[in-house]
Image (spheres, rainbow, N blue to C red):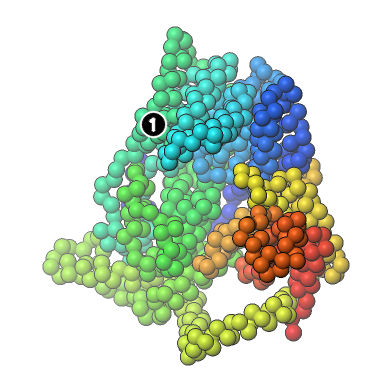
Amino acid sequence: MRYVLCLVATLWMGLAFAQHPSSFSPLVSENPVPSDFVVPSGDKYQEEIKKISCHAHHQAQTDQQKFYLESCFVIDDLLHSGNVLFNDPLSKYLTKVKNVVLESQPKIRDQMRVYAVRSPVVNAFATNNGIILVNMGLVSRLKNEAQLAFILAHEISHFTQNHALDLYLDDVNSQRERQQNPMGKDSANEEIITTNKYSKELEISADAEGLKLFLKTDYDINEIDGVFDLLKYAHSPITDIPFDTQFFESTYFKFPNEYYLQEIETSYGLNEHNEDSHSTHPSIGKRREQMYDNLKGRTYRKLEDFLVSEKVFNKMKTQCQYELSNLYLREFNYYESIYNSYVLLHQESVMDDAYLKKNIAKALYGLTKFRNKDRDHETESSFENEDGEIQRLYYFFNHMKNDELNVLALQYAWKLMRTYPEDDEMKSIANDLFQEMVDNHYESETEFYDIDHAEKYAPFNSFSQSKKRKSELKKFEREFIKYAFVDIIKDRGFSEAFKVCKRKKDAQLKTALLDQNKTARQIRRETKRKERQLFKKGYALGVDKVVVVNPYYMKMDFRKRDTPIDYLSSEFSEQQYADWVMSNAKAVGLDAQMLSTNLLENEEAEKMNDLMYITEWFNQQLELEEIKMRGFNQERVIEIADKYGTDHFLWTGIVSGRKKKSIMGFLTFLYLHPAYSAYYLTHPAYESMFFSIVVNVRTGEMEMTKMNPLFEKDSETVVNAHLYDTFLQIQKKPK
């Protein structure tokens, strides 16, 4: 479907910004919280090892115990990441489809659980303990329920055939054989290829067993082929429609023709017959051919595309497509976020255009911030690496200069802010983009044309191609960026924003000039003095209440080559640490509340949702700290801060490891302290790290960052001393 370019430009300036409240809401978990999320990993492990046959060889028993130990904790880490939803509408729908697929096997049906995952990646996978995780990126591209049913049947087969354990044991045995019989420098590569070959066999097996399960239902068998098409185009957007770069233009603000890609590479998807020896999956073509062989001799009859609900399927598919716009932002895939939002804006029925336009503004904001910091290589790539209509979007931004991108982002955000004046998040983004423009590119509104100049001099498409007009057109193409703010340049708020940003820049330059007058030696001395003062006096945040987020504890043993993490000890220590955190906060009189996945109860889904948003925000802050840019769920985080009555959230934990003693260390100790050499040999060596980070979630500022190495055993006394001191510094009033 192609769109009339002038109509799109008109809509962008007019109807597209028609005011209405935001109606789209992302999916969240709902009560009750399933046992998968509340039962401790150690308890799950004790149940899993009951599956091990007592008649198995001792080595096999050991390998299986190790598998169940690691898988229980790794799976729980994923469940507690905040990306896995439960009892939400999508997970409930997926469960109903699973129940249809397993209608003939009620025992397995009751064993298996299905949860939706907040990820744009086209994927689904099953765990060894009966959980199927389905990504939103997969649901967003399905054509019907029958395709979903076959995918679930495939994943169910992985579980019933115990493929996860088989693959693990095969890998362990391969490594053991390699250690016993070294095969030279290429052995590692050959081992990977051998392991992947076995993994591919398991995928073909899951297709075959999944087909048997699928054929027991009344779903249309003809839809299976579409599943392989879905995999073939998994890297592509949800649909391929022409991207009109004039979408970003207005009456006077137009980009040069060379910014527009005239011809694109048609999207052919992956080469389905390309067999990669380093891939864990067989080629799509091989899987498709194997499926055709399995279906030979069967009568093709048209059955049903939907058995649960076509209406619910379409609703959940649309929901996931809208979620993608924000999920792409979270992963810094700004081009994908813009194109996904653009596609949805051009659907016949738009659920929430304000939400989509805000995502576009946020993506432009992110691109601008990374560009101005010369870190665009982290978020952008060449249009030549893409195919389909999204190529035009990549080409457009690849050809745009940094100042042009900044101006475009500010123009888009400013108009959106003016349309939704109560939106504090858009106001914050527009103000930051303004400061970016003044700091890096333009300092005064006089560098841009106003409406009088534009009406008199700006060329339009209706200009005749006379020599005079051609020369004016060339001049316009050189100066097109100056027409960006024609219709808003005389806004009082716009002019005042220039002045505010200029004053802030001048103040920063003044401070920088003062620093330049100092010698390097003076700067080093001043820095060391501040560090000594901080070390001696500590922080003084003057905070009365803090929310502690997921207190963390990891016990490691670096003497072990293959599995340095002591999962069971870590879990026990983490439970202890949570108690120590609260008791020390109480001891200093600090009001503390804890948000922890380890402390969730059956009716606390709301806390899980809070953890999802605050953890996602914090992870973004760690990535964006040097960019000086806040995460894209700031609105939700401020709501959480208001809910708990504090802007200050604390992340704290310990990583404790027992390490090897080196021969050189012993000889050094023997030489320097011969009387104590026996002590060195008999007493274990430890190396730990205590950390505490206090963040003001309203401002995004990290007000405390403590990283204290502990060159001793992480005893209860030592840990409590550090916690007590930390809470004292959080509570202490600044002088």
Q: What is the number of callouts on the image?
A: 1
Q: Can you see residue 595? A: no
User: Does 30 appear above or below 300?
Assistant: below
Q: Position of residue 18 (x, y in %)?
A: 50, 57
- Is disc 1 surrounded by few (<14), some (14 to 19) or many (20+) residues within 10 Å? some
Name the image quarter holding residue 549: bottom right
Name the image quarter holding residue 707: bottom right
Label 1, secondary structure: give it.
loop
At x 68%, y 65%, the residue is 669
User: Does 79 appear above or below 437?
Assistant: above
Residues 55 and 32: in front is 55
Among all residues in the image, which is located at the extreme left? 467
User: Does 470 appear above or below 303?
Assistant: below
Amino acid tagged 1 = Glu
At x 78%, y 71%, the residue is 725
Q: Left or right of 598: which side holds 636?
A: left
At x 58%, y 86%, the residue is 525
Q: Left or right of 565: which side holds 725?
A: right
Q: Left or right of 681: which side holds 296?
A: left
At x 48%, y 69%, the residue is 433
User: Does 18 appear above or below 521?
Assistant: above
Indicate the quadrant containing the C terminus: top left, top right, bottom left or bottom right: bottom right
Residues 150 and 290: in front is 290
- The residue to which callout 1 is attached is 275
Indicate the quadrant containing the N terminus: top left, top right, bottom left or bottom right: top left
Residues 322 and 735: in front is 735
Q: Position of residue 595 (x, y in %)?
A: 75, 55
Q: Can you see residue 273? A: yes
Q: Position of residue 666 (x, y in %)?
A: 66, 60
Residues 592 and 337: in front is 592
